[in-house]
Image (tube, coloured by chain):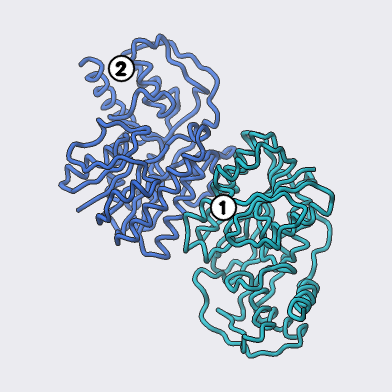
Chain colours: A blue, B cyan
Amino acid sequence: MRYLVTGGAGFIGGAIAKRLLEDGNEVYIIDNFKTGYKFNIPKKAIFIEGDFSKNSTIEKLNGVEFDTIFHIGGQSSGEISFEEPEYDLNTNTLSTLKLLQYAQKTDCKKFIYASTMSVYGEEKSKEQFSEDDKTNPKSFYAVGKLASEKYLDIFSKEYGIDYTALRYFNVYGVGQNLENLKQGMVSIYLKQFFDKSFKEIEVKGSLERFRDLIYIDDIVDITIEASKDSNFKNQILNIGTGKKTTVKDILKLIKTQSKIDKKIVVTNGTKGDQFGIYANNSKLKSIYKKELISFEDGLKKMIEWINVKYNS
Amino acid sequence: MRYLVTGGAGFIGGAIAKRLLEDGNEVYIIDNFKTGYKFNIPKKAIFIEGDFSKNSTIEKLNGVEFDTIFHIGGQSSGEISFEEPEYDLNTNTLSTLKLLQYAQKTDCKKFIYASTMSVYGEEKSKEQFSEDDKTNPKSFYAVGKLASEKYLDIFSKEYGIDYTALRYFNVYGVGQNLENLKQGMVSIYLKQFFDKSFKEIEVKGSLERFRDLIYIDDIVDITIEASKDSNFKNQILNIGTGKKTTVKDILKLIKTQSKIDKKIVVTNGTKGDQFGIYANNSKLKSIYKKELISFEDGLKKMIEWINVKYNS
């Protein structure tokens, strides 16, 4: 099979591309290196450098036909979307439109989209969200992702392109960018624990905040499964574990597993940061039967990886 | 006061600009004549020709400070948005972002936005919608308008720009473009009744379809009121009469009032056409106390205007 993976130089896109190649497929990648890195791109992939919201980049695909388009790339931080909202609209919404039009033109009938739990926003006294709940996006990022989901629905109904919109919750794991201190709670704390230049751990906001942490291997597996299993067809799905893990829990487990002890300093929260939401994932569980990796196990893998990284 | 009205060469924007000028204000207009006409632009307005989703157009405003920005312009047909979805995203969403950024930069604290009932889409066995109902946009047009509403909410919360998003239902009245046979049920039928080159009236779809018809003078009045009355502040409002008028009713009343009798031919419906929805307008009525113009009275005004038009 032949696949396109956008954002293949990023943490998630790179991991998906890698798995698809291991399974013997042909994989095209588009990335503009705005947040991605060359080392994430698997060697066997056919790489096109460029911004996938621009015609000039799409044209480089030269009409190649794909069995599935995995649109994974895009600016992925609510916080950062406030700095460049226009870029956010282009990279997260216009890009989806252009890739759907490309799919339509080249007769590609399947489109898998990396959406986000951020579309739910946050409501007082509501922590768990299911796909039927009202959306309430609070950042440019979330608005753009939600608009993309609606585009998928239109292209499915009007032009017969099947889609799956995966509302990823908090993804972590081996391969995550430890240098980005603005995104990824687990990687941010791990960096501060393991990097000796940090004398203490800064927690921006309450220790009671929580996340629904899902391991990268599960994300890869579910995302690829979505392109194969017809139960995923034309669905919007929460991709989370359905479990709350508080900041306090994360720090405690890192401390135990890493055997590193540093002082925790709690400072002010960052703009637009969510206190916490977690997934009602019963829709996912009804069609995806494998057990999801626990945070204990996922963190263990990540710490082993970091130990090798820091000791090599 | 100094105001900016986008789409001031269009039916609604032009009428708003005219009223603001009559009330002694200074009015700037931006329009690209994609669907607007020079004759709609009031003579006393300061006119800037261009696409308001482009920096080059916004720059022509030269940092002028406005008391309120009325963002009325944009592609306004669900059906047509399928032909040029990218233009639709730019003109209806990117434009809102750029104008909000301009407001932020120039310290404009009020933004009135022409949204649409199309954001509700259509659901089986549900005809009346209130602002708290789920949105379900079925066209690129509706997706873009909805994303704009979310941008307004973000700019209000993050940067203190007050907004009102007016979800216009079906606007009709004196000044409407009778030559556009793709948009405006009342004007489409009137054209066919009054233009002698039409031997019969073609109705595309069921006679039982219905609309919530609101007269242009009410739209102008409510839209300007929204910029003055603090009850409208940071609100999304249905702007409709709360009354259903079927296609059959419209045709019957035109026939009675115009004393023209032509054969009615029912043909297939157009893609994406709504069967009908109407407004729950209790939120509007709780803050706007004037009586709305009935369809009988509105149609009478329109027919008088057409009679003058066709006999001069």
Q: Secondary structure at mark 1?
A: helix
Q: Is residue B75 left or right of residue A303?
A: right
Residue matched to label 2: A258
Instruction: Judge by depth and name the residue closer to the eye, A93 or B25.
Output: B25
Q: Is residue B72 left or right of residue B24?
A: left
Q: What is the quadrant of the N terminus of chain B in the image?
A: top right
Q: Residue at (70%, 80%) from the top-left corner?
A: B249
Q: Residue at (53%, 38%) from the top-left corner?
A: A139
Percent across and percent down for residue A88 are 47, 40
Numbered marks: total = 2
Instruction: Judge by depth and name the residue closer to the eye, A16 or A5.
Output: A5
Q: Secondary structure at mark 2?
A: helix
Q: What is the quadrant of the C terminus of chain B in the image?
A: bottom right
Percent across and percent down for residue A243 are 41, 36
Percent across and percent down for residue A312 are 20, 16
- Per the rendering, the mark at residue B213 is none
Q: Amino acid at mark 1?
A: Asn
Q: Are marks 1 and 2 on the same chain?
A: no
* Spatial CA span between label 1 and label 2: 51 Å
Instruction: Judge by depth and name the residue closer to the eye, A155 or A22.
Output: A155
Which corner quadrant of the image does residue A175 belong to? Answer: top left
Report whether residue A67 is seen.
Answer: no
Residue matched to label 1: B92
| Badge 2: residue crowd in 10 Å (few <14, some 14–19, many ≥20) | some
Q: Residue at (61%, 81%) from the top-left corner?
A: B207
